Amino acid sequence: MSTLKAGDKAPDFTATDQNGEKISLSDFKGKTLILYFYPQDNTPTCTKEACNFRDNYQSLAARGLQVVGVSFDTEKSHQKFINKYQLPFPLIADPDKKIIESYGVWGEKKLYGKVYMGTLRTTFIIDAAGIIQHIIEKVDSNKASQQVLDLIK
């Protein structure tokens, strides 16, 4: 569970996307950013979430929202995931988990009674000034984009 809260300055980051291009929080200055963290490319729930953002991308973009996904997968994995599902937004490769940890979304998870460490599915809505406006910790992968739109007035 993230220690960040609405009203906090979003932690700065610079990393590479699926094409090896540098991407930083400062690239989104003056824009509203939907920064979503997910556990892994090509897993059923993560694919549903990414495809939900894809299917509703036009309505998000029409509201001036930028979408960026982050996981610890490699650039190559992200590239395959984007190509397979025609995702229209960048995915940041964070294999050393620097961004994941700075946003406080690396934590304990449970699956079939087994406890392990992993990325906690979380969406941050960051305003034009780099301030966190909303944090969605209970992400519904089938309605991830609607959860965002419901918070943005």
Image (cartoon, grey):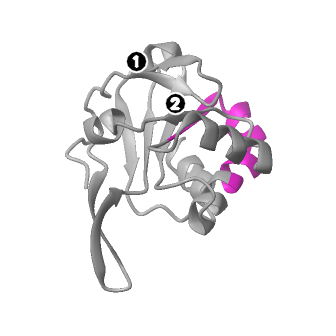
Location of residue 51 by image quarter: bottom right
Which is nearer the N-term, disc 2 or disc 1?
A: 2
| The one of 117 and 48 positioned closer to us in this rendering | 117
> Is residue 8 found left or right of 88 in the rendered image?
left
Location of residue 62 by image quarter: top right
Q: Is any part of residue 30 visible from this angle? A: no
For the magenta stretch, what is the residue range?
A: 51-70
Give x and y (percent) for residue 93. Answer: 50, 35
Q: The N terminus lies in which quarter of the figure?
A: bottom left
Residue 129 — which label? Answer: 1
Circle 2 residues within 10 Å: few <14, some 14–19, many ≥20: many
At x 29%, y 51%, the residue is: 106
| The one of 18 and 87 positioned closer to us in this rendering | 18
User: In the rendered structure, which amino acid carries the disc numbered 2?
Assistant: Leu
At x 67%, y 33%, the residue is: 63
Q: What separation in Å lies between label 2 and label 1 (alpha carbons)? A: 10 Å
Residue picked out by circle 2: 33
Give x and y (percent) for residue 90. Answer: 63, 32
